[in-house]
Image (cartoon, grey):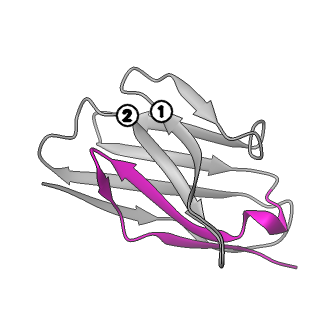
Amino acid sequence: QVQLVESGGGLVQPGGSLRLSCAASGSSFGMYAVGWYRQAPGKQRELVARITFGGATSYADSVKGRFTISRDNAKNTVYLQMNSLKLEDTAVYYCNWALAWGQGTQVTVSS
């Protein structure tokens, strides 16, 4: 059973930055790829970024060049550095790790 806790969300102005964290605990999560997803009101949940255990990354076109996903396997934590935030980045952000989901963290980009 894997437990995930996301943190780091908040309110930020357009052009600002936030760093999200996803901390894992439990068992059987070490070798999995991890994905950051987001869901805006009235929209489907979408994959934003993904990182394999070995560190290979991929991104949605909408965030390429602005977001960076990374992981610290020793700390069982995955990060999402979000720069140059836009209004349309507003959503609840979730991490997915070993088929488990966290509770989500709200990111609001507003002037």
Residue range highlighted in magenta: 85-111
Circle count: 2
Question: In the figure, is residue 86 to the left or right of 74?
Answer: right
Q: Is 96 in the magenta?
A: yes
- Dot 1, how many residues are within 10 Å of its Cα: few (below 14), some (14-19), or many (20+)? many
Q: Amino acid at mark 1?
A: Ile
Q: Are marks 1 and 2 in contact (CB under 8 Å)?
A: yes
Query: Badge 2 is on which residue?
Result: 33
Q: Amino acid at mark 2?
A: Ala
Vertical comparison of 39 with 78: above or below: below
User: Which mark, by number, is residue 75?
Assistant: none
Q: Nearer the viewer, residue 94 or 41?
A: 41
Question: In the figure, is residue 22 to the left or right of 59?
Answer: left
Question: In the figure, is residue 27 to the left or right of 4?
Answer: left
Q: Nearer the viewer, residue 75 or 47?
A: 47
Task: Kindly indicate the quadrant of the structure image that contains residue 92.
Answer: bottom right
- Dot 2, how many residues are within 10 Å of its Cα: few (below 14), some (14-19), or many (20+)? some
Position of residue 94 measured from the top left corner of the image (x, y, whole percent): 47, 61
Which comes before the other along the chain, label 1 or label 2? 2
Residue at left 82%, top 78%? 110
In which quadrant of the rendered image does the N terminus lie? Answer: bottom left
Q: Secondary structure at mark 2?
A: loop
Q: Nearer the viewer, residue 15 or 27?
A: 27
Position of residue 104 measured from the top left corner of the image (x, y, whole percent): 45, 69
Query: Badge 1 is on which residue?
Result: 51
Residue at left 66%, top 78%? 42
